[in-house]
Image: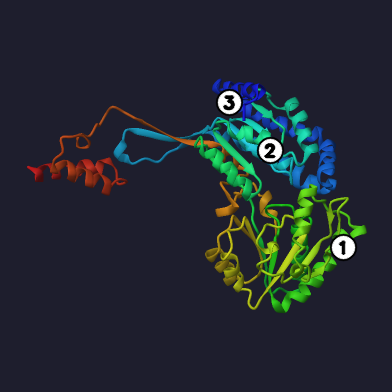
Amino acid sequence: MEESPGLARNLAELRQTFRSGKTRGLEWRKAQLRAILKLLDENEDSIFDALQQDLGKHPVEAYRDEVGVLKKSATYALASVEKWMAPKKGQIPLLFFPARAEVLPEPLGLVLILASWNFPISLALDPVIGAISAGNTVVLKPSELSPASSSFLANTVPRYLDSAALKVIEGGHDAAEQLLQQKWDKIFFTGSSRVGRIIMAAAANHLTPVTLELGGKCPTILDSLSISDLEVAIKRIVGGKWGLCSGQACIGIDYVLVEEKFASILVELLKKCIKAFFGDSMPNLKNLCRIVSKSHFDRVSNLLGDPRVAASIVHGGSWDEQNLMIEPTILLDPPLDADIMSEEIFGPLLPIITLNKIEESIEFINLRPKPLAIHAFTKNERFKKKLLSETSSGSITFNDAIVQFVADSLPFGGVGESGIGRYHGKYSFDTFSHEKAVLQRSFYLDLEPRYPPWNDFKLDFIKLAYKFDYLGLLLLLSGLRRIFKRSN
């Protein structure tokens, strides 16, 4: 595909801005972070409107998952960026004395951020916060599946942020393909594993480092709990499944594992909570996002097309194709070989899988690709330890769901097929930085055993140097006389 002249000019300007050193300064970075906060403050209603158009998000959900997340992230970065970018003293062996060392974070250069459609504002600007905190120039491509949010970003970001250092480029697959043909210093992508493979293959052509925030089938484990604890757990499960973009979230709950004897009470409590949160029937649904597009609606509704899957529905199952709405739906023990149990659902369908013993959940999870998150509701400390030591996932949260995503002090990212790399808070800064080792030595005390010609004395000296590396130069020098006498 031939590169457009406009794209070439934009990339040339961004590279020139980076080479000028402008983005490396502390004040520039702080100014951009303040500009993001100002953008969010002055355009809150416009953001709510865009998210309503794209996904039917209620303003409360829009603030919680998009605006509020970004304000918290930008404020944290603004308060911390000076400390993050400061060189850190490096520990070196006294053998190098006199010398000093440091680790210097430096920006990578020109980075490409490919955003997702399910949280089209926060998953676009949150990586931008990390990239500009680290001193990079940025191309941001919003998702074409959330056109109102994409248009908002394209029209609003240039009014607040430095347009010589950050460009918003809209478009569909053709635009993404053209961008991926370019040489970048970093690519950051949020989306599906299928597209993630395409991103990684394109990045390999230029040996470009990537961060891939993907997803997978995130399980929730429900152990035996008291009635009061169970009621809290049910609210958190319902909120983490249907209250998060109607299940269209990479970190959202994909299925629940529970002992068979507790399945019936689980189903009844889920029904009760769904009714309280979202309504009791398809015509009365409220506080629920719609499916983002007709193609995604068809994909999710087709998961119920298997008669064996449809037979497992114990609640819901209705949909409104015209308005792209699907009722919160519970399925009890659908066939494990059905698409609903092999594909990431990314919609408001919740399978419940029953087990004889809750400990069997470990093997169930381990037989499948590593998930982005595991949520486990249990007070059994021994079981917690087994989950921590015997499963692998991007994160694990006990007795809650989703909240780990908004903790700036914790890394967010996947493992295996659920992603590569991590971000949030300082981890975002690190993702878009290179830690450069800097060693400065004196011309004094140049030890001859490091140079040819080789002999037994030099071999003994080097062995001693490595063996007692951290005991210090004085110990080595004190042993030098003994080694020299023995060699003669």
Between 312 and 66, the residue placed more toward the observer is 312
Q: Residue at x 77, y 29 (%)?
A: 156
| Count of numbered badges drawn on the protein | 3
What is the crowding at mark 2: few (fewer than 14 residues within 10 Å), some, or many (at least 20)?
A: few
Residue 116 left/right relative to 463: right
- Residue 173 is tagged as 2
Kindly tell me whether residue 79 is visible in this rendering. Answer: no
Which-is-in-front pick, marks 2 and 3?
2
Q: Look at the numbered disc 3 and give the secondary structure of its residue.
A: loop
- Residue 164 is tagged as none
Q: Earlier in the sequence, mark 2 or mark 3?
A: 3
- Amino acid at pointer 3: Gly
Which residue position is annotated with label 3? Answer: 25
Which residue position is annotated with label 1? Answer: 276
Q: Look at the numbered disc 2 and give the secondary structure of its residue.
A: helix
Q: Position of residue 464 (x, y in %)?
A: 22, 47
Q: Residue at x 75, y 33 (%)?
A: 153
Q: Earlier in the sequence, mark 1 or mark 2?
A: 2
Q: Look at the numbered disc 1 and give the secondary structure of its residue.
A: helix
Residue 454 left/right relative to 358: left
Residue 43 left/right relative to 411: right
Q: Quadrant of the N terminus?
A: top right
71 vs 267: above or below? above
- Amino acid at pointer 2: His
Which-is-in-front pick, marks 1 and 3?
1
